[in-house]
Image: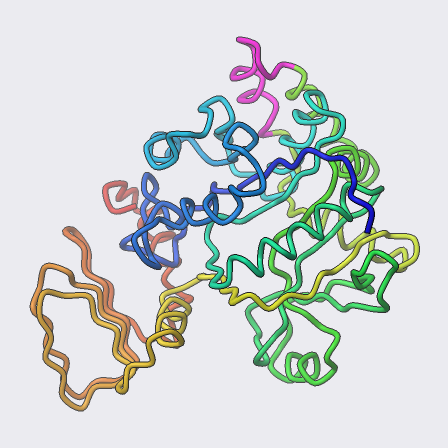
Amino acid sequence: MKKAKHNFYPVILAGGRGTRFWPLSRKRRAKQLLALDGTQTMIQQTVHRVQTLAPPSQFWIITNGDCCGEIYKQLPRLPKKQVIAEPIGRNTAPAIGLAAFILLRKDPDAVLGLFPSDQVIRDRDAFRKVLKQGIEIAASGENIVVLGIKPNRPETGYGYIESGDFAANGAQRVRCFAEKPNAEKAAEFLLAGNFFWNSGMFLWSARTLTNALREHLPQTATILEKIAATYGTNKFAGILRKLYPKCENISIDYAVLEPRSAKGAQASNIYCLPTDFGWNDLGSWTALHEHHTSKTTPTDGNLIASDGIFTLHAEGNYIHAPKKFVAVIGVKDLVIVQTEDALLITTRARSQDVGKVVKHLDEKKLRKLV
């Protein structure tokens, strides 16, 4: 493949609250700012695995006002002016769209990579190899590239990508995007062999993305363009606060990818690069337990962070109580997480419901606990 001229800009989305990781995840120290997998935090890992492909001066982070200060501390080499705090969450389409309109003004040849800040990838070399291929495809025309994850089980918690034939650029054309399926449909997807998990990682030129937003989300595109025009001036913060809340609250999948793929593979120019580099979307305590046990395979399936442990006839538990001696007897598949001011007890099967605790705390205005 002929090497295309491009400038690669990683855009990291770090605005989520990580409510399903309560009580560790809080507004000012959300999931992406925690070290859930090793010594580096999730956002530090996200930057580290891409930094060989772009200098710190080309990284952009879209977050919220609560997390900005901690991001500055954790990523001191990144320009503070490129850490943009949304005044209110408006999902992924306005977030990545704002970065695209700003970068289009700065660099007409910009190629953007969209990366969630809460994923883990084991094989970073394989990841970067696929990423380089995707950057070249995105830079070579009006192309959108999505990294698809080869499924190893019938997963109901992820969206899927149905792929078609291989194109000349080495990627597979996308036939359609499928929402999170039920168990029966997920099993069908796995057997079909041409369905991949939607990783949420996308590549496109700034020009391609802004044109797509003007086509499919015209009102929001106009707002974002007005905001971007003030970037670098003393008007930017005020205009951002005033106009950004008027953007539609919609994901980039719904706003651009699904409408474009509905036109048919030949017309949409959306490509999938199927990958297998040890990807995991850490969306809950159960997902974190499964991620760690897949690496260490403890005989009893217990993962316990504590100052001392005693277990007896206990299996498959995730316990976080780092300043306590923990004794676990006769229980199975529990999640227990202790902090200085809160204690969570649930089952691994119900860990997806932890976000409801945060909703309750918000409603009761118990701000110290969120």
Along the viewing direction, whichever of 214 and 131 lies nearer the viewer: 131
Q: Position of residue 188 (x, y in %)?
A: 70, 83
Q: Position of residue 29 (x, y in %)?
A: 32, 43
Question: In the rendered image of this protein, does residue 269 appear above or below residue 347?
Answer: above
Q: Residue furthest top?
A: 234
Q: Position of residue 322 (x, y in %)?
A: 15, 60
Tell me where residue 5 sits by quadrant: top right
Q: How is the image coloured?
A: rainbow
Of the 4 image quadrants, the one containing the C terminus is top left
Whether residue 239 is in magenta: the answer is: yes
Q: Position of residue 346 (x, y in %)?
A: 29, 71
Give the residue displayed 51% in from the left and 33% down from the top: 88
Give the residue displayed 46% in from the left and 53% down from the top: 118
Q: Residue furthest bottom?
A: 313
Q: Which residues are magenta?
A: 230-245
Give the residue displayed 53% in from the left and 46% down from the top: 50
Q: Is residue 306 left or right of residue 227?
A: left
Q: Is residue 214 left or right of residue 225?
A: right
Tell me where residue 195 sits by quadrant: bottom right
Whether residue 36 is in magenta: the answer is: no
Tell me where residue 300 sits by quadrant: bottom left
